[in-house]
Image (spheres, rainbow, N blue to C red):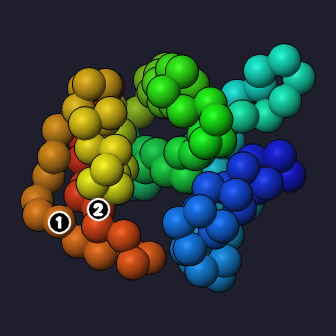
């Protein structure tokens, strides 16, 4: 989890100016974490947390700047979806930054509701059946 936190610190806290007390939360202790490794270096991460009956929330998806657009995020997301499905979950939800909404649309997520602010960044709730 230390390497995932280092990626999240760079992406969310340093790049996007998300306050550390919001980024590092209590869900980390019981979340399932995914870490992408390329040539021995951690380059991306994501997590999922049980979120009610038959549902998981995917979040903290982050890829280092120089590895974005290389498919790392899609691989992490697909891995988490597969793991959720294997564990018997039927639906995945997430809060997508508006700048990443197209990415999630391509991965089968659909928008739910309007735009809202989370940590000073515009987001939209999205979901996908598993």
Residue bearing mark 1: 115
Name the spot of residue 75 as percent of width and height, x first.
Answer: 53, 21
The percent position of residue 1, horizontal first and vertical second, equals 81, 49
Q: Where does the C terminus fall, quadrant-wise?
A: top left
Q: Is residue 126 above or below residue 105?
A: below
Above or below residue 3? Residue 114 is below
Which quadrant of the structure image shows residue 38?
top right
Taking depth in this image into account, of 129 and 102 the one nearest to the observer is 102
x 46%, y 45%: residue:
58
Q: Who's the residue at 54% across and 21% down the image?
A: 70
- Is residue 91 visible in the rendered image? The answer is no
Few, some or many residues within 10 Å of mark 1 (<14, 14–19, 20+)? some
Left or right: 74 in relation to 11: left
Q: Earlier in the sequence, mark 1 or mark 2?
A: 1
Give the image location of residue 64, x and y in percent. Answer: 65, 41
Q: Nearer the viewer, residue 53 or 99?
A: 99
Judging from the image, what secondary structure is the residue with disc 1 in? strand
SS at mark 2?
strand
The residue beneath circle 2 is 123
Compute the Cα span from label 1 to label 2.
6 Å
Q: Residue at x 70, y 58 (%)?
A: 10
Q: Relative to residue 53, is residue 69 drawn left or right?
A: right
- Mark 2 closeness class: few <14, some 14–19, many ≥20 residues within 10 Å: many
Taking the image as shown, residue 18 lies to the left or right of residue 91, namely: right
Q: Is residue 13 visible?
A: yes
Q: Within the image, what quadrant is residue 83 found in?
A: top right
Asked whether 112 or 119 is in front, the reply is: 119
- On the image, the x and y values in percent for residue 122 come to 29, 67
The residue sitting at 66% across, 67% down in the picture is 14
Please tell me the numbered disc located at residue 35: none
Asked whether disc 1 touches disc 2, contact meaning CB atoms under 8 Å apart, the reply is yes
From this viewpoint, which residue is outermost toward the left?
113
């Amino acid at each position: 989890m230390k390497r995932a936190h280092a990626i999240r610190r760079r992406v969310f806290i340093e790049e996007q100016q998300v306050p550390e007390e919001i980024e590092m939360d209590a869900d980390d202790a019981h979340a399932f974490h995914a870490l992408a490794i390329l040539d021995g270096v951690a380059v991306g991460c994501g997590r999922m947390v049980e979120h009610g009956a038959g549902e998981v929330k995917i979040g903290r998806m982050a890829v280092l700047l120089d590895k974005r657009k290389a498919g790392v995020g899609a691989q992490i997301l697909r891995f988490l979806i597969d793991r959720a499905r294997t564990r018997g979950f039927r639906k995945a939800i997430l809060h997508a930054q508006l700048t990443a909404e197209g990415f999630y649309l391509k991965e089968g997520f659909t928008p739910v509701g309007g735009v809202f602010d989370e940590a000073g960044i515009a987001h939209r709730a999205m979901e996908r059946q598993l």
